[in-house]
Structure formats: structure tokens, C-alpha cells
Image: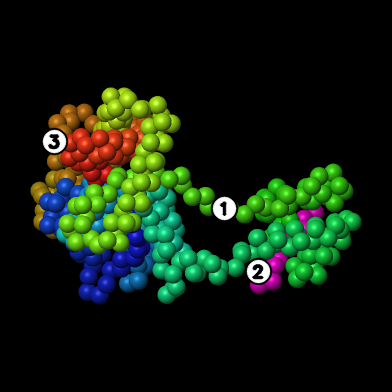
């Protein structure tokens, strides 16, 4: 379960842009909070010198566009992403933070993700540069951006098997109450009005529009189009398939009015409950020793009976009534899951290396002329003070190249091609990874239940289930 909050970061009083960026990044990259810096990831920037890179991009933006903002300028944005205690590992939280940042910024902004583990709940600080990578535009906070981040975060959590906040608070009212009292949207009201009008069997399109007018719908023909507007609606909506759906297109409505076809109202979305899953049996005696009462024991007895029935259904349905077959299949599923997990992690590590290397190559190229002039000036302190961010970027790039032992730099185009190939490989493997994870968890749970029922040593199987749940 993860919650999010988006916040703009301003310069503030008495601070330069460089100082403001440095203060923000120094806080989120605190080694005491990020396990010595191990839980820091970055995209299109080097987290160690991100403040200099962000500052350099803003100077590039000013040079290219000539647009200058005042003291209210937003220099960066941050998302705080918090997870429920015990549900996720720090490494997985960091990976989900990178995925959220990449999708929300659409890969157009440099960002860093710092996972903090100093509190009971693991949480991410995601900071992205307000200036785009090409230094021609800036990200502007929009109405509903917080809701957009939350929905994207929920989507990522569902894709990866983590829980979401089912009932988030909204304006002091629980989400389910707010949803229950929320009226239908304007387009739904238009569809419902058309459905009611068609139920009265109008003879032609003019009579249908007359019935809509009597129902309070404003009808406004404009050229070859017919526009509709519900009471309280600001803008008109065209009466066509693109705006209201195929069943409400003019051609479809004319066919209904002439008797050539039957109108099918727009279906309502119905949430179907997931099929019941097999859960681990409850150790009732252990719970009683921990202080649980007789009521809990009665509930646990019923719960265990249901889980035993589901376990038998699973074994019968999958032809695993032989214990050796069950153990072999559980081991094979675990091995397949671990293999896919390592494949995805290897791709992510290489993608992170490519992103950093690409950034250094670009920075090296952009700042080469400045560094040459600095060298010709005899490494003047005055010159360095005037071009400090460019010189720092250039030196950091040279240091990175030396550390990698690169004698010949790869082209940015080749790195982009490799990155795209790895990203495609990761995406194709991820659906298999999720299926393998779910299959492994279910098999290990079933095997643990069988072990407990048969009186086998349950410690290893239970520990295996717990280890995989943690992963």
C-alpha cells in the first residue's frame, strides 16, 4: 500500500538557485537515511552532482528561451511516496519510485529517487528537474496533478502485486462515501437522457431531439453536427461516436429510429471480486499462547477449514495429489521466478549505467569548450567561480570515464539503442515475472498447508513463503 504527495520546490528567501537545489538534494540523499547512499537511483543525471546539473540546465533554458521567472519560480518538484510497514523491501520501493517518476515525467525530465529507511515506514523522495532534458520547456503543476500521481501510483502497485489505498480521504470525507454521493458525469447524463428518449419510441431524429429538449438537454445544431449540453455543463458535446460512444453515433441512432437495429445502452462498469486464493493455515495454538481468546480460536477454526478445502481443490484441479509432484512443481516455480527476477534486475542495472554514462557524455560535450578556456586561463580561480557548474560537470564526466576505463567513448545513439532494447526486454519479461511470482506464491502456500496437515517439518516451507513474500 503506497500513498503519494506532490510538492513544488521554490527558491525561498535569501537563497540562490544553486543553493536551493543543493539544500534539497543534500536532505534527500542523507547517507544515514539511504543506507550509506545505496538506495539512491537517478535518471539522466548523476545523483552526486545533480545540483550542478539541474543548475546548468536552467542556465541553458534561459539562454535558449530568454524566459526568466521571478522569486516564485519552481526549480524542482518532489513526490513523497510512502509504503505500509512490512509490505515492501527498500530495494523494491526504490525500483517502484523510479518507475513512477519515469512514467509521470514521460522520460522528459532528469530525476533522482532516494529511499529513506530511517522511519518505521519505507518512503521515497522523488525529485525531478522542472526543466526538460532539451532545456526548452518547464514542467508546470496542473489542476489534479496530485490525483494523477495517485492513480498512476495505484496502477503501478496493482501491476506489481502490492496493495493500494482503497478508501483514501478526500476533503474530509472518506473515499467510498464521496464516490457514492458523486453524481454521474455530464456525458453519462447525456447518454442516460438519450436512452430515456429512445425508450419513448420517437418517430424520427427531430422528435428525439425534441424529447431531449423537454428533458432539459440543450440542443444546438452547428453545421453538419448536432451538439448537446446537459444542465450545469460548461461546454457542448457532439452527438457522435467519438464523444459518446458507438451506440450514440448519428448513424447508429438513425438505424434505431428506422427499426433496423436495437439500441443497447452504454453498459455500467461492474467490479468483479477476485476468485478466492489459498492462504496459509493459522497456527491456533501459537496464537492462543500469544494471548488470543476463545473467539479468535473459533474464527481461526472456520478459517482453517475453508483453507483446507481450497487447498484440496487446488491440488485436485492441478493434478498434484502426489506430494513429490507438488514439491517438484513448487521448486520449479521458485527457480523460474528467481531466474526472471535476476534477468529484470540485470537489465535495470545496465539501464541505470547507460543513463549515467549517456548523461556524462552529453555533459562532457556541452562543457568541453568552457573547460578548454579554463585550462588556457591557467586554471584561474576567477574563471572557475564564473563557470563553476560547467567545470564541475566536465570534471565529473572525466572522472566517470576514468573509473570505467573507457579509452573510446561510445556514441549517444548506440547507448540509446541499447537502452531501448533493454527496456523492451524488461517489459516483455515483466508480465512473465508477475505470473511466475503469483504461481510460486500459491504453490508454496499450498505446499506449506500440506506440510502442516501431514505433520512434516513446517519451518522450512513457512520460512520460504515468508522469504518470497518479502521479496
Q: Nearer the viewer, residue 279 or 434?
A: 279
Whether the magenta-drawn stretch holds residue 462 is answered as no
- Is residue 139 in view from this perspective? no
- The answer to the question of whether label 1 and label 2 lie on touching residues, with beta carbons closer than 8 A, is no
Q: Secondary structure at mark 3?
A: helix
Reply above or below: 236 against 379: below
- Mark drawn on residue 203: none
Asked which colour scheme the image uses, the reply is: rainbow
Disc 3 to disc 1, C-alpha distance:
59 Å
Splitting the image into 4 quarters, where does residue 330 fall? top left
Residue that label 2 marks: 233
Residue drawn at 82 percent across, 65 percent down = 211
Residue that label 3 marks: 402
Disc 2 to disc 3, C-alpha distance:
63 Å
Magenta residues, as a range? 220-235
Residue that label 1 marks: 270
Mark toward the start of the polypeptide (3 vs 1):
1
114 lies left or right of 224: left
Amino acid at each position: 500500500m503506497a500513498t503519494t504527495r506532490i510538492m513544488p520546490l521554490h527558491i525561498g528567501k535569501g537563497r540562490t538557485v544553486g543553493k536551493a537545489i543543493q539544500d534539497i538534494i543534500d536532505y534527500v540523499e542523507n547517507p544515514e537515511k539511504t543506507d550509506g547512499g545505496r538506495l539512491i537511483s537517478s535518471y539522466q543525471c548523476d545523483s552526486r552532482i545533480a545540483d550542478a546539473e539541474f543548475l546548468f540546465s536552467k542556465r541553458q533554458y534561459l539562454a535558449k528561451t530568454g524566459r526568466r521567472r521571478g522569486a516564485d519560480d519552481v526549480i524542482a518538484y518532489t513526490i513523497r511516496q510512502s509504503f505500509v510497514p512490512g509490505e515492501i523491501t527498500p530495494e523494491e520501493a526504490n525500483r517502484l519510485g523510479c518507475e513512477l517518476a519515469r512514467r509521470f515525467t514521460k522520460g522528459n525530465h532528469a530525476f533522482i529517487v532516494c529511499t529513506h529507511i530511517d522511519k518505521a515506514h519505507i518512503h521515497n523522495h522523488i525529485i525531478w528537474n522542472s526543466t526538460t532534458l532539451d532545456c526548452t520547456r518547464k514542467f508546470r503543476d496542473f489542476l489534479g496533478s496530485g490525483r494523477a500521481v495517485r492513480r498512476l501510483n495505484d496502477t503501478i502497485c496493482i501491476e506489481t502485486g502490492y496493495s493500494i489505498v482503497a478508501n483514501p480521504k478526500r476533503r474530509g470525507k472518506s473515499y467510498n462515501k464521496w464516490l457514492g454521493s458523486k453524481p454521474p458525469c455530464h456525458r453519462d447524463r447525456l447518454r442516460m437522457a438519450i436512452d430515456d428518449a429512445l425508450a419513448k419510441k420517437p418517430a424520427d431524429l427531430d422528435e428525439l431531439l425534441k424529447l431531449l429538449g423537454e428533458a432539459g438537454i440543450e440542443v444546438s445544431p452547428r453545421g453538419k453536427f448536432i451538439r448537446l449540453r446537459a444542465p450545469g455543463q460548461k461546454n457542448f458535446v457532439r452527438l457522435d461516436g467519438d464523444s459518446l460512444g458507438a451506440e450514440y453515433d448519428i448513424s447508429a441512432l438513425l438505424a434505431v429510429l428506422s427499426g433496423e437495429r436495437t439500441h443497447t445502452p452504454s453498459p455500467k462498469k461492474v467490479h468483479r471480486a477476485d476468485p478466492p486464493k489459498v492462504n496459509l493455515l493459522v497456527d491456533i495454538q501459537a496464537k492462543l499462547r500469544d494471548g488470543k481468546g476463545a473467539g479468535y480460536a473459533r474464527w481461526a477454526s472456520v478459517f482453517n477449514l475453508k483453507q483446507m478445502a481450497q487447498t484440496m481443490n487446488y491440488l485436485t484441479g492441478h493434478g498434484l495429489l502426489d506430494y513429490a509432484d507438488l514439491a517438484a512443481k513448487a521448486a520449479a516455480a521458485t527457480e523460474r521466478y528467481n531466474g526472471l527476477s535476476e534477468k529484470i534486475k540485470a537489465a535495470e542495472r545496465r539501464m541505470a549505467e547507460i543513463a549515467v554514462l549517456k548523461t556524462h557524455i552529453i555533459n562532457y560535450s556541452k562543457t568541453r569548450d568552457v573547460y578548454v578556456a579554463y585550462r588556457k586561463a591557467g586554471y584561474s580561480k576567477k574563471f572557475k567561480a564564473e563557470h563553476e557548474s560547467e567545470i564541475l560537470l566536465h570534471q565529473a564526466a572525466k572522472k566517470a570515464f576514468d573509473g570505467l576505463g573507457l579509452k573510446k567513448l561510445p556514441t549517444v545513439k548506440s547507448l540509446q539503442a541499447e537502452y531501448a532494447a533493454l527496456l523492451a526486454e524488461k517489459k516483455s519479461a515483466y508480465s512473465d515475472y508477475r505470473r511466475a511470482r503469483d504461481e510460486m506464491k500459491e504453490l508454496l502456500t499450498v505446499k506449506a498447508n500440506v506440510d502442516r496437515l501431514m505433520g512434516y517439518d513446517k519451518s522450512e516451507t513457512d520460512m520460504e513463503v515468508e522469504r518470497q513474500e518479502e521479496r
